[in-house]
Amino acid sequence: MQTRRKAAGIVAAVGLAAGTLLAAAPAQASEDARAAGSAERAGAARVQTAPPAPVGARADAGAMASSPQVSPSAERIRYVSSGNDYTCSYGRLCTRVWDPVAGKWKVFDLYVCRTYSLSYWNGYGGYVNNQTTGTKAYFYNSSGGVIKTSTALNTSTSYNWTPVWKIKNC
């Protein structure tokens, strides 16, 4: 009969299974050790997997820098050195956000009427609503509530993108 591992022991298994990285992790409290006892007696090893990698814009602020993105794709994406040195063609909602990877402002020209999901948009940037006169753009928070409405032809020299998770440009 196999002996039960102590609750304070460490499971040190590292491997790759079905695309999930298995990592060394401390054993759980004594309740977990008792619950696992039957599996261990049957000869099965108890291995804990690391949690899945965070997904989305604000999953982990302490993670390595990532370039801001929109989904679906913008009509045009470009970089500018200054936050105020870009133009926005008529019929577009142009948004700018700091890209820490490129070290420049990233400008997204949104033309097709859609709801765009934002990834890695943090801090201040801005937008130019140069759509057809009267067209409204909506900025949504994480729970889907409208936090900003912009009516064309309207500009903003500064806007905090951190609470914005989606934009509908029409």
Image (cartoon, rainbow, N blue to C red):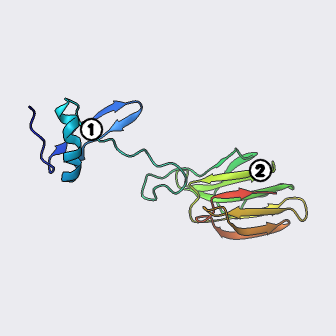
Please tell me which residue lies in front, 101 or 129: 129
Image coords of residue 106 (percent x, y): 64, 54
Which mark is on residue 74?
A: none
Which mark is on residue 114?
A: 2
Element under disc 1: loop
- Distance, label 2 to label 1, CA atoms, is 44 Å
Please tell me which residue lies in front, 162 or 37: 37
| Left or right placement of residue 47 versus residue 119 in this view | left
Please tell me which residue lies in front, 57 or 5: 5
The residue beneath circle 1 is 47
Q: Is residue 30 above or below residue 14?
A: below
Q: Quadrant of the N terminus?
A: top left
Image coords of residue 72 (percent x, y): 69, 44
Element under disc 2: loop
Image coords of residue 29 (percent x, y): 21, 54
Tell me what residue is drawn at x 33 percent, y 41 percent.
49
Q: Are marks 2 and 1 in contact (CB under 8 Å)?
A: no
Tell me what residue is drawn at x 54 percent, y 51 percent.
56
